[in-house]
Image (cartoon, grey):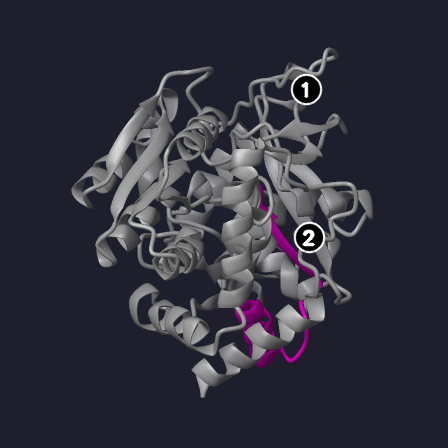
Amino acid sequence: MEADWHWINFKINFKKEGNFMNYGEFGGQYVPQELKNKLDEIKEEFYKAIEDEEFIKEYLKYLKQYVGRPTPLYFAENLTKYADGAKIYLKREDLNHTGAHKINNALGQVLLAKRMNKKHIIAETGAGQHGVATATVCTLFNMKCTIFMGKEDIKRQRVNVEKMKLLGANVKEVVRGEGTLKDAVDEAFDYLLQNEDVFYLIGSAVGPEPYPEMVKYFQKIIGEEAKKQIIEQEGNLPKAIIACIGGGSNSIGLFTDFINEEVEIYGIEGAGKGICTGEHASAMSNNKVGIMHGMKTYIMQDDEGNIKDAYSISAGLDYPGIGPEHAYLKSINRVVYDSITDEEAIDAFKVLIREEGIIPALESSHAIAYALKIAKKYKKDDCIIVNLSGRGDKDIDTILL
């Protein structure tokens, strides 16, 4: 029955949303013609796949039997008492196989690659969770796997690097630029352009079409489950939902099923050492629109239009842009985009451990910190949902520094 419910919702939501690429002035496909041809091939097959009942059933089967979905929507009673405001619920994506939301999308895209007879998967990663998820599904389906990762992120995320290698992935150190997520994406696109029979499995809701739409589609199960679960547990919708944002996959996954509901939505970027210091990862804070990684969106830029380096203690948030749908949602004032500093995120990391015995990823800690900030804005019988996008074992070394 559960699988039937998911199948019905996937079909209904796809039909209801219609054109996935309607992001106003944002999005697009700003790439060389040779790359455009490859992207259009993926786009065509993607739209065929999501109309194919057998493809969706296979995807949902693996989500249930391999990934471990549905993930719980957990009432964090101790955290709620600590915040002294609305009830705080955690959507436990950290309990997925591989420890984060990333595998939802990695699984969907690898099944698409398999359908297209691609044998070599490439991916970028910052925090390493997408790299681990990609390496995992490549092992599952016996595909060659190459992961591009910046030199700085390799240092910060040593545990996940070793996991990828154990899973058989070839981890390519990216030394260009600052050696972070942006540079890994650049390297992966270059490789895709220069090589045939390669499928680029993007990890966030960024890049040229159809990637933002694909990632959204394979992540929207987060919000579909959360909506059903909160109604079952509380009898009504939440007053607010919150998720962290680097490129924006876990957040768009949670937001999608709530966009047309009377629910306040918050997307939280990394404020790093403070917006005023310039050392942050908030693409939304300067309201500058530009072209990066084949898409038009909000980007961290200087006065000459050059892309600025992003900084966050969280490797998954230090991306100088944001997915085009998030840019659109900001432009129409549907989502409130704000930011949390490193210090606030670390404090929230420790609070969640102490109060609930849950070790969150530093990315997710930004969303937890924001929930603690706004909980008193609501009545005590109201509820808010925070997407706990990943677990924090990968961040222990960072916290201990």
Mark 1 vs mark 2: in front? 2
Q: Distance between the residues labelled 1 and 2?
A: 25 Å
Q: Residue 183 appears at what percent x and percent y?
A: 46, 24
Looking at the image, which is closer to me, 119 or 309?
Answer: 119
Start and end of the magenta stretch? Answer: 224-246
| Circle 2 Cα neighbour tier, 10 Å, few/some/many (<14 / 14–19 / ≥20) | some
Q: Residue 37 appears at what percent x and percent y?
A: 54, 43
Looking at the image, which is closer to me, 389 or 25?
Answer: 25
Which is nearer the N-term, disc 1 or disc 2? 2
Q: Residue 208 appears at what percent x and percent y?
A: 59, 41
The label shown at residue 21 is 2
Residue located beneath label 1 in the image = 301
138 sits to left or right of 226: left
> Splitting the image into 4 quarters, where does residue 362 fall?
top left
Relative to residue 162, is residue 16 depicted above or below?
A: below
Q: Does the magenta stretch include residue 397?
A: no
Label 2 SS: loop
Q: Which amino acid does label 2 sit on?
A: Met
